[in-house]
Amino acid sequence: MENIKPIQPTGAVSTVANLGPSSDRSIQIVFGLFWLWYVISAIAFLRGPDWLSAFGPISLSLIWWAVLWFRKTLQQWSRALSLPVWLKFLLIGLVFSDVIMENLAISFKGDLHPNLFWNSVLWLGAYAGVLLGWWLMAHFYALTPWQVFFIYGLKGVIVEQDFMVPLMIWKKQLLMAFLVIPYLMVVYAAAVAPVFVLLQDELPKPQRRLGWIGMALAILLPMVLFYAGAFIWFKAVSLLGLKVPV
């Protein structure tokens, strides 16, 4: 990668102005309130009995902001890769989802396999399916990184641990739901949104605005392809005779 400048911070104000929500004052207030809500949630988890396990998931928020802060240099590095955009999208997306997010979210305790390498191998199909879903969405709708962040984060809140949060609300465990919602949103968002930052200038530029139908598709399509990708990948692993050590 030639002519790459040293990493230079872009700045928080510029970050929000260029990649953040609308310049509308009310949207900015909502945006700020979300991160206040997240800080309250993070403090609550760090003060809880399982505080050590909370460090990994919470660190994903720092990684997200680091991606935004240094986005110009990271985008320059991405442009220097002589690969098709779809392949860059897949590879960069898998680094953030299957390697960074997956390991930090589980605090380096494999959920499909105790060996972290094999754990990531087993998750490849599912996360590739998610990325395929977002790649398709990027061809039909004009998406900002922050839209991807909040939409995929919302999907995580809905489905995590067999609809845990909706069930909390149903059972009137409102305080716990209040604390878990922003915590989960950032974990899920950090899996996909960074690739939209790094490839922002290289992705397609469709003119269709993201409405309610688009938002529903953005939740459902990656979710369906998550399970389809996992199913196909596990079948492929079996057919290829790949021996995953126990």
Image (cartoon, rainbow, N blue to C red):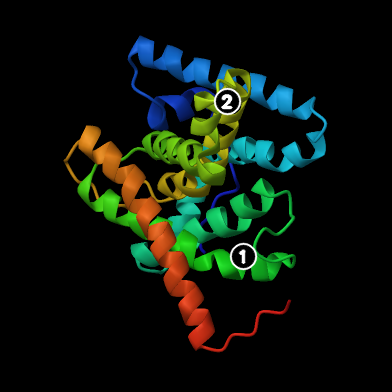
Q: Is residue 60 above or below residue 198?
A: above
At a point 48% along the width and 43% down the height, the residue shown is 159
At a point 44% along the width and 69% down the height, the residue shown is 231
Residue at the far left in the pictured view: 207
Tag 1 residue: 120
- Label 2 sits on what residue type? Ala
- Quadrant of the rendered image containing residue 149: top left
Helix, strand or loop status at disc 1: helix
Placement of the C terminus among the 4 image quadrants: bottom right
Q: Is residue 116 above or below residue 214?
A: below
- Quadrant of the rendered image containing residue 111: bottom right
Front-most of residues 185 and 36: 185
Front-most of residues 74 and 135: 135
Q: Is residue 207 above or below residue 136?
A: above
Residue 113 image point, x, y percent: 69, 66
Tag 2 residue: 177
How many other residues sit within 10 Å of disc 2, few (<14), some (14-19) or many (≥20)? some
Residue 241 image point, x, y percent: 56, 89
Q: Earlier in the sequence, mark 1 or mark 2?
A: 1
At a point 79% along the width and 27% down the height, the residue shown is 48
Residue 160 image point, x, y percent: 53, 43
Front-most of residues 153 and 178: 178
Do labels 1 and 2 touch, CB within 8 Å?
Answer: no
Q: Is residue 97 left or right of residue 85?
A: right
Gap in Å between the C-alphas at discs 1 and 2?
A: 29 Å
How many other residues sit within 10 Å of disc 1, few (<14), some (14-19) or many (≥20)? many
- Label 1 sits on what residue type? Ser
Which tag is nearer the camera, tag 1 or tag 2?
Answer: 2
- Quadrant of the rendered image containing residue 66: top right
Helix, strand or loop status at disc 2: helix
